[in-house]
Image (cartoon, rainbow, N blue to C red):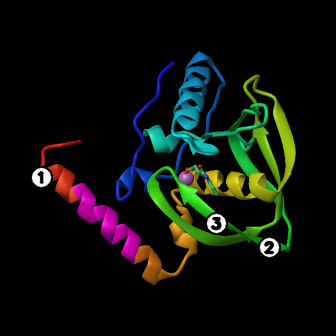
Amino acid sequence: MSVRPLVIIPDSRLRLVSDPIVRVDAKVRALVSDMFETMYDAPGIGLAAIQIGVPERVVTIDTAREDEEKSPLALINPEIVTASEELSVYQEGCLSIPEYYEDVERPARVTVRFMDLNGEIREIEADGLLATCVQHEIDHLNGVLFIDHISKLKRDRVVKRFTKVAKEKEREGGA
Ligand code: GNR
Ligand code: NI
């Protein structure tokens, strides 16, 4: 179990399409365990494996508030099977784009099919913050970031800012 370093934009790994999990084995369970640890440490309400540099279709989510009991959800190979026509707007953030927040419009309700940690196929119906979060995470599995859903002007501005910071860090000889 360990907290792993987060991959931050403009790292090109965030644009990879992640590979499906063929078998839920000890390696996948260890990955999920590191993902929960990293997500709770950040803290964040969701994490896709590529955000710790692993291009596999694994997502962790916990949308419980601090005053609520934990409700960890691990989704393997998640797919949206139905999405509502009704849309809703949430202010989104991303651990790979620290401290940047912007409104994004997405379907208000989705049905998601996935494999659980026992390798069983399950479905959940999500609305509210969970619906937004699960769509945000499935986007990550396809190399899509929430800034792809905002205006090009805003996206270019935030990418430019993070590119500058990354270049400064490089000059300092940092990671
Ligand atoms: O912690 C997170 N908060 C959040 C808020 C609104 C919509 C989506 C999210 S997901 C984000 C963590 C993250 O980057 N997951 O990929
Ligand atoms: Ni994210």
Callout 2 amino acid: Leu
In whole angstroms, how far apart are the C-alphas of marks 2 and 1?
Answer: 44 Å
Residue 150, image x, y percentages:
55, 76
Number of the front mark, 3 or 2: 3
Judge whether 99 appears above or below 85 on screen. above
Residue 161: say if magenta: yes
Which residue is labeled 2 in the image? Answer: 87
Q: In this view, does 172 lie above or below 29?
A: below
Q: Which residue is drawn at 84% across and 37% down?
A: 122
| 146 relative position to 114: left or right | left
In-image side of 131 versus 43 (left or right): right
Number of residue marks: 3
| Residue that mark 1 sits on | 171
Residue at coordinates 86% horizontally, 67% vertically from top-left? 84
Main secondary structure of the magenta stretch: helix
Contact flag, marks 3 and 2 (Cβ < 8 Å): no
Q: Name the kind of residue labelled 1 in the image.
A: Arg
Ligand 1 within 8 Å of disc 3? The answer is yes
Tell me what residue is drawn at x 76 percent, y 22 percent. Answer: 118
Choose mark 1 or mark 3, whichever is in front: 3
Helix, strand or loop status at disc 1:
helix
Query: Which residue is labeled 3 in the image?
Result: 91
Say whether residue 99 is left or right of residue 108: left
Q: What stretch is highlighted in magenta?
A: 157-166
From this viewpoint, which residue is outermost toward the front?
67
The quadrant in which residue 132 appears is: bottom right
Q: Is residue 94 above or below residue 67?
A: below
In the image: residue 54, left or right of residue 146 = left
**Does the magenta portion include 1?**
no
Marks 1 and 3, how far apart in space?
33 Å
